[in-house]
Amino acid sequence: MRSVLLLASSLGLLAAASDPKPFDCGTNTEHASEDFLKKIQALHDKSQSGSPAARAALAARDAAATGPINVDAVFHIVATSAAKSSITNDMPSAQLTALNTAYKPYNIQFNLINVTWTTNDTWAIGANTADDLAMKQNLRQGSYDTLNLYFQTDLSGGVLGRCTLLSSIANGKSDPTVYANDGCNINAHTMPMGTLNGYNSGMTAVHETGHWMGLLHTFEGYSCTGPGDYIDDTPQESTATGGLPLWGKPNANMTNSASPKSHQKTTSKVQPLPPSHTPEKKKAKAKEPSVLRYTLNLLKARPPHNYVECECDNSSQRDPPPPYEP
């Protein structure tokens, strides 16, 4: 199945630092195409339209929609000479298991069609857009509908991962770099059995894959009054933080009616142990044109997470995050 949209080709200049900052994800709308932003805004506006009865009828139809979404995937292991021994043969298969376990409740399955292994000190760092593009032009496989994940041992930019967002093409014609850049860069040590303690459960790939599907952070724009992720049942947030707020504590600065507890269950944000999102979305019209790669299901299927937290509040006390359990 081929979507009319591809991932944006613009990545921006990458910083030289290789150590990730706590919980950082390098994906945001600065790298989104104007067309993507218009499409997702239109979807948001449409979700608010129609009578309650019409929306209820649509929800009932969506709930009855069946059929798995199968996504071909290619994993690229890109290591420096010094770090190549830290990535074992078992790690890609364990990463696939983590990805499929996370998305299985939402009827999305990833088929790993190939794993490539490359030792290249320059590509494993990806210190600038030219190096990143050269790597992807040489390694990328499959069609625009194939998920390519690049697991780099020394990923630059001070982030755990980043991914391009969707971009439109006209009649199959576009800048060739749109195809080449399509995919996600991920710190290889976040794979299961990786050396990045606290982040080595494979959930960074789950998080970034959500961006590949067209999902944004709830703290996009860093505002309690902005659009956030453009999805109505995930409240906007002013910042990305770690930890959990106290259960039941009022969120004085939250501008919608969501309770702290419901917000904890639906918020998508970058998190420690591990960073990812939570799945609380319903399926949407399966045949409706979408900004997403396959169907609008993907916009409504929130990438999973065991815990989330609420922002846009005035709480300073935080409960420690629970241990991660896949």
Image (tube, grey):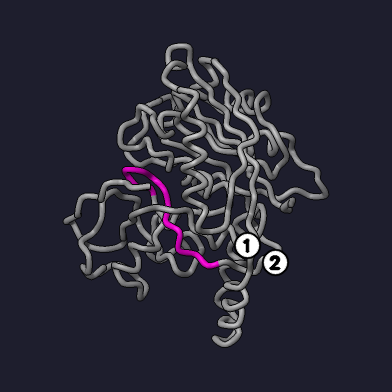
Q: Position of residue 4 (x, y in %)?
A: 73, 53
The residue that appears at 64% across and 50% down in the rendered structure is 70
Which amino acid type is shown beneath numbered disc 1?
Leu
Secondary element under disc 2, as helix, strand or loop, is: loop
Q: Name the residue at the top extreme.
A: 81
Q: Amino acid at mark 2?
A: Glu
* Residue at (67% x, 33% y) in the render: 180
CA gap, disc 1 to disc 2? 7 Å
Q: Which residue is mark 2?
A: 288
Label 1–label 2 contact, CB within 8 A = yes
The answer to whether 232 appears left or right of 200 in the picture is right
Can residue 278 be found in the magenta stretch? yes
User: Mainly helix, strand or loop, the magenta region?
Assistant: loop
Magenta-colored span: 270-282
- The part of the image, by quadrant, that contains residue 234 is bottom left
Relative to 141, residue 291 above or below: below
**Camera-nearest residue between 256 and 301:** 301
Q: Secondary structure at mark 1?
A: loop
Q: Which residue is mark 1?
A: 296
Percent position of residue 259, x then y? 31, 72
In the image shown, does 314 or 303 lie closer to the viewer? 303
Q: Residues within 10 Å of mark 1 (few under 14, many from 20)?
A: many
The numbered mark, 1 or 2, whose residue comes first in the sequence reads 2
